[in-house]
Image (spheres, rainbow, N blue to C red):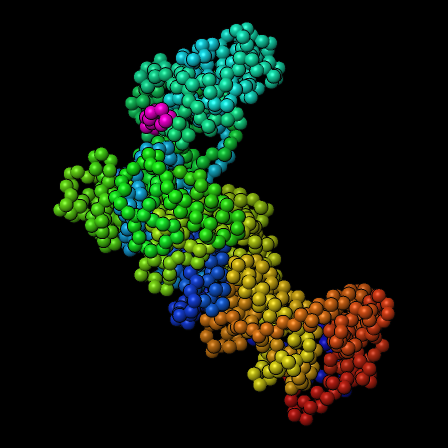
Amino acid sequence: MSDADPQQSEQRDYRDTVFLPKTDFPMKAGLPQKEPGILARWQDENLYEKLRDTRRGAEKFILHDGPPYANGDMHIGHALNRILKDMVVRTQGMMGKDAPFVPGWDCHGLPIEWKVEEQYRKKKRDKDDVPRAEFRAECRDYAAKWVEVQKGQLERLGLMADFANSYLTMQFESEATIVAELMKFVEAGNLYRGAKPVMWSPVEKTALAEAEVEYEDITSTQIDVAFEIVESPIQELVGAHAVIWTTTPWTIPVNQAIGYGDEIHYQQLSDPDDGRRFLVAFDLIDEFRNRYGKPLRVVSDASISDVIDGLKDIVEHQVKGSELAGTKVRHPMHKLGGFYETLRPMLPGDFVTTDSGTGLVHMAPDHGEDDFDLCKTVGIEPVFAVMDDGRYRDDWPWLGAGDVDADGKERRRAVINPNFNAPDGPICSDLRDAGALLSASQDYQHSYPHSWRSKAKVIYRCTPQWFVPMDRPLEGLAPRKVDKEQRWEGEGGAVDPADEQTSEHTLRSLALNAIGDTQFVPERGRNRIRSMVEGRPDWVLSRQRAWGVPITLFVRADGSYLQDADVNARVVAAVGEEGVDAWREERKNEFLGPDHDPDEYEMVTDILDVWFDSGCTHAFTLDGTRWPDQRWPADLYLEGSDQHRGWFQSSLLESCATRGRAPYDAVLTHGFTMASDGRKMSKSLGNTIDPLKVMEQYGADIIRLWALSVDYTEDHRIGDEILKGVGDQYRRLRNTFRYLLGALAGYDESEAVAPEHMPQLERYVLARLKQVDGALREAATGYDFDRYVRTLVDFCNEDLSAFYFDIRKDRLYCDAPDGMERRAYRTVLDTLFHALVRYAAPVLVFTSEEVWGTRFPDAGSIHLETWRDLPDWRDKGLSERFGALRTLREDVMEAIEPLRREKIVRSGLEADVTVPAERVPEGFSDADLAEAFITASVTRSDSADVTASRSSEDKCGRCWRLLPSVAEDGALCDRCEAVVAELDAEGVSS
């Protein structure tokens, strides 16, 4: 039956005899208005606990939620992340598993402190003037406020989680567990204090982890500086100048050596104007000459060659780097005496290359990892010249507190100040006055680390910190063990791992083994985290901040720390009762007890790296007692791809060090959400998408459908046009459910027809459903959610709406209610309904509840159901025949389309079609074909073409089909005449 208005019969209007779908389910969703009511009902019914009761005893699936910072509204990245997690636990639950979801929040650390300090700055208060306990209390209150805000936002997003019992890193119990985990490192001696260059934020005055840093493109000052060679086994070099190039002029005041490459060839150049000689790498002569800006000549055999016009094959009198051993240079500021008077050695460094610069690298062990390591080999130690705020210390002879200009003003600035490093700044000016500045330009573009919180530049700064060694032997802990009480054997001690021999089982080797045992989705994540772990330095655990879990160590005057399990137990118990404020000087005697003299120990005031906090979340959520539905290890960790260097890695290291294996069996990573044009979202660009506003405008189910439709493994996009497209996709799914609800009105199980008695079209659709069921289960198991959604949407649109529903609407509308074909169709629709509403439930959480409640108002929530185990209806031969039929059907519709455009026919029902006999699959009569193609008739021919023409038959006044049995337009066909007669006899109409 077509969708056109029926022609009115002169004898009778048959519209009341047609069985059209009936439902109160509206076509217009009204999600923003409807969803809050559904959410309120779930909350009133405590649906999450009902779900736990329903699933208890089933096989467990544990997704451990990585804790976001509690410091602001949910953004689009949070929304995508939590929707993916919700999809995981919902699909696992629908497959019959017990999949609890305990959400968590990271409440300590710099992000929270920074927000509280912002409030202080507005009030012109200095954090350092506030008592530490008071400041921490404000941080705790601030985090608690945003935890509650984000909980509400996530619930509005449709997450099914234990919001009433979520975990917070600032819960006293959590803080105590973090301390207890730290004590496992302490008691094993797997912690040492050392001075190494670490990334430091002068603005926030603390060390930063790699995961707390982001890289931005900047323009820096680049300079070439001459260091006079005063001693060398190569006599002709004495009096020449070793030239270094750097983009950090502020490190020149703490230079202590120059690095060269053993295999690099160096060449002397001469300035014909003043006769000065410069030593640079031969391969970099052109680069240096361009920066120097004046002609230079190659020094050869005590004579001067022609001016260089380009690189030449000049090899005589080149110096190989290895020949520079024993050479010493003088600092350009040597006239200041003291520190600057000491000669600087030239040292071989395997990190020195000819990629850029001069092939000679100035060494400042305070401010570079390579510098530190190389200088340490010859006993050169850091001088700690730069203070925590990024300024040189007061007593530093060059640019310290006493270094003032002609007006008596201090020239000292923070070393990250661009003006301080500028070509006309104090450093370059002094080097120029000393005759050592060979070039200076503020035009070098490169990527540079910034604090992701303050957005300010960071520096490498050598400070005393607490480290976990990556390469210290872990003799007492074998890999892959999971006994949480296992400890290393022996006392250990605060030993620098550089002085130890490595063994098979180090923290690094355990972590790399664990990476090999872990499933990664997508697989490329394995190589990413592996490369990071392979190359990472020792883990810097300490931070010089206030809001966090303290490093609860008692340190002796010689730098060693107390390893006493009884003391540690008292500290852990106190933190469990009072939180981090328990670690204070007033309780020192209590903690140490009668066996230790308090005067022999100092309490460490540093706090733990916040990544250690979050790296311990598995210990108090999965391996603790507060959440009995959890278990260790987790099946899955799921976060953004940036967490390979963040939470994934800190959890891996913490767990390997304390349990011998990773806390997870699988790791899933997603990309970042970009604006619709592919650019990074930025408030300044005005291209951000607020998920809260999206929910207000479209509803949560729309943003969920978007999140689960994108390829989350890559960076993906969102924007108004994209969301409109998702809205169209949603409407098609909604209309599928609306049709099912209407077509199943009044359906009763007594109507059901067994599959073996159904027409072949119904059996084919059941076979397709079984295929789809398998594909969806496979996609859910593999976390391939965009394929999941695509499979579901394509099945609804292409297999059902455009094919099956289209063909069978004539049977639904016009067959007798007890007709076998109609009953078979409704039986399949009932099967489809139960399957589709369950498939849609993890995606469209509110809409599926609305659909389910419309049909079964007293049946409870759809989210307490599981996917039904379907019989194996697959039939390869049947599927192949219908596949061929559907291809032929498309050609038939294409042949009819010109007739529709020219208004020769209004629909296919008015067309006679001829098809190639050889293309008709076995088992279909011409009547079957006409029904499948929705045409007046189908005939077969020997032609290879599909043709269509206007039928000459009359139209049935009830079903609108053009059939030979219709005597005249408006009269009834045989089928309709029998149905109407039966209805008239029973006094029944639709």
702 and 750: which is toward the camera? 750
Q: Is residue 937 visible?
A: yes
User: Who's the residue at 59% across and 15% down the image?
Assistant: 314
Residue sitting at x 33%, y 36%: 500
Q: Is residue 250 above or below residue 945?
A: above
Placement of 405 over or under 514, stated as above or below: above
Task: Specify whether residue 435 is painted magenta.
Answer: no
Q: Position of residue 845 (x, y in %)?
A: 50, 65
Q: Residue 663's spot in the image, x, y percent?
A: 39, 54
Q: Residue at x 52, y 30 (%)?
A: 445
Q: Residue furthest bottom?
A: 985
Q: Which of the image's four quarters has the N terminus?
A: bottom right
| Prevailing secondary structure of the magenta residues | loop
671 left or right of 632 in image: right
Residue 870 screen position, x and y as percent: 56, 73
Quarter of the image with the C terminus is bottom right
Q: Residue at x 48, y 24 (%)?
A: 261
Which one is nearer the viewer's eye here, 384 or 986? 384
Magenta residues, start to end: 375-386
